[in-house]
Amino acid sequence: MGNSPSKNQHGIQGTIKNSSSSQQQQGLSLSDETGNEPNDPDDSRPLPTINTTTTTSIASAKSRAQQQPISSSASKQKTYGLDIDMSLARDLNNKYPLSNSNTSSVSTNSDSSFSMRAVPQVMTPHVGSVPTNSSPYFSDSQFDHSPMSLPPIKEENDTAPSSVSSSFRKGSKIPNQRSSKPIILKRAPHDLSCTDQVNVDDMIEKLLYLGESRIYHSKDFPFRSWEIQLVCTMAREIFLNQPSLLKLQAPIKVVGDVHGQFTDLLRILRLSGVPPETNYLFLGDYVDRGKQSLETILLLLCYKVKYPDNFFMLRGNHESANVTKMYGFYDECKRRLSTKSWKMFVDVFNTLPFAAIIQDKIFCVHGGISPQLTNLKQVTKIQRPTDIPDDGLLTDLLWSDPDSSIKDWSLNDRGVSYTFSKKNIADFCSTFNFDLIIRGHMVVEDGYEFFARKKLVTIFSAPNYCGEFENWGAVMSVTTGLMCSFELLKPHGIKRKK
């Protein structure tokens, strides 16, 4: 671990259907479930050529690409499963009763579809991406095929952007475009004598500034409980007014687990851009394990409040009362703020959507697929707010995992949900006419890992997870032409072995 992903053999094959010659050239056979994975060292199929791009200014759409030879040596990727004792989690639930979040005054239309229709134009795709008028993503025509080559990858640059918006707090390297009409959340809107209020722009800028400050001590949380409550209440209403199954449009950046690694979240914003110039979809697992889950989830919710039609968040298995009691978020709230604030966040977690579809072709979810999922309307009909049950469709969407060693559904070693095979993925994509599944939920060494002949990719965005895994972090960029590429975060803070 710790080696650059650009030295591993990963490539993205074309998925243009109705092109038998293209499939023959790539050597693809969807019915061959026992064949080599695309990232196997002994897989000799030709792979597309990669352009390695340099980091660009956040406010600039210009970028440069530099051809780089790829090493012929490749090693099998490692995947780390982190088991959770759910029986213990359920026992703990009795000790910390929650406020009732199963009712809401906000009406929702869960059957309606939601798309980014009035979204501002985002930045021009980086060099190595396909033009906006191109055919399906991962298109053969966009690459010069040669062995030992990779998908488009952009790596992080340590330098700050050369030009940023002038409207952000001095001292922060991450820009924040202030709203022309300030978003003000009032503590008592009907009480003229109460002047307590929150400016969402001020909160975002304070978080960005403190996240980059060397004198900020994470034990001191800079916001009061009532300020947290205002943001949580507004975010909760926004989530409930959007469907359980989001229908989104590209271009968009897809981010995997961040797990309270706040400084790495800021690195993602510096690398991939800030809203609204960049549209985002986060796949869940925002809290637990990391030291700054409060800052992480609060910044994400502030962005959601400010840009409800550009910034999207799915639910992960850690967005749960039971799991957060075991893996750090409850203790962090109790230590740095209050248990009341933890309940506020859990109430928001119970309203998060469960999955998203990008331009009818890419299915995005935190965990994976379910043997119970036969119609996508089943997802839209799951009522929110809701806890995560012990089993069933919702549990599978948030907990299931791929397993290359099985031929059909099997019980998950985590003790929750199932594992699915290459055949299950092929059947799912065929049934619902999807070209790709993007999911998180697992630590992968290079930040991304393919499965089932590149029909599924795991994205993990917390580099050097827990300070010990030495993994890279990755963000997946999906352009208007449905061309996918990766933006990578180095695992900083690794101690060199003597």
Image: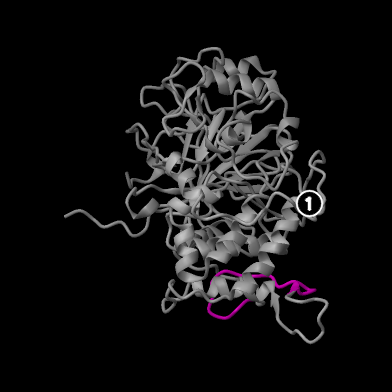
Residue 236 in percent (x, y) is at 70, 57
Q: Which residue is mark 1?
A: 241
Q: Residue furthest bottom?
A: 193
Front-lying residue, 337 or 38: 337
Choose top left, top right, bottom left or bottom right for residue 235: bottom right
Q: Residue furthest top?
A: 31
Instruction: Check disc 1 and give the amino acid type.
Output: Asn
Front-lying residue, 413 or 486: 413
State whether residue 290 is above or below residue 429: below
Residue 368 in percent (x, y) is at 56, 33
Image quadrant occupied by the C terminus: bottom left
The kind of secondary structure the magenta stretch mainly shows is loop
The verdict on residue 169 being magenta is yes
| Residue 154 shows in the view | no
Position of 167 with respect to 27 (left or right) is right
Give the extent of the magenta segment: 168-185
Residue 31 in percent (x, y) is at 55, 12
Front-lying residue, 112 or 144: 112
Residue at x-position 53% and y-position 36%:
399
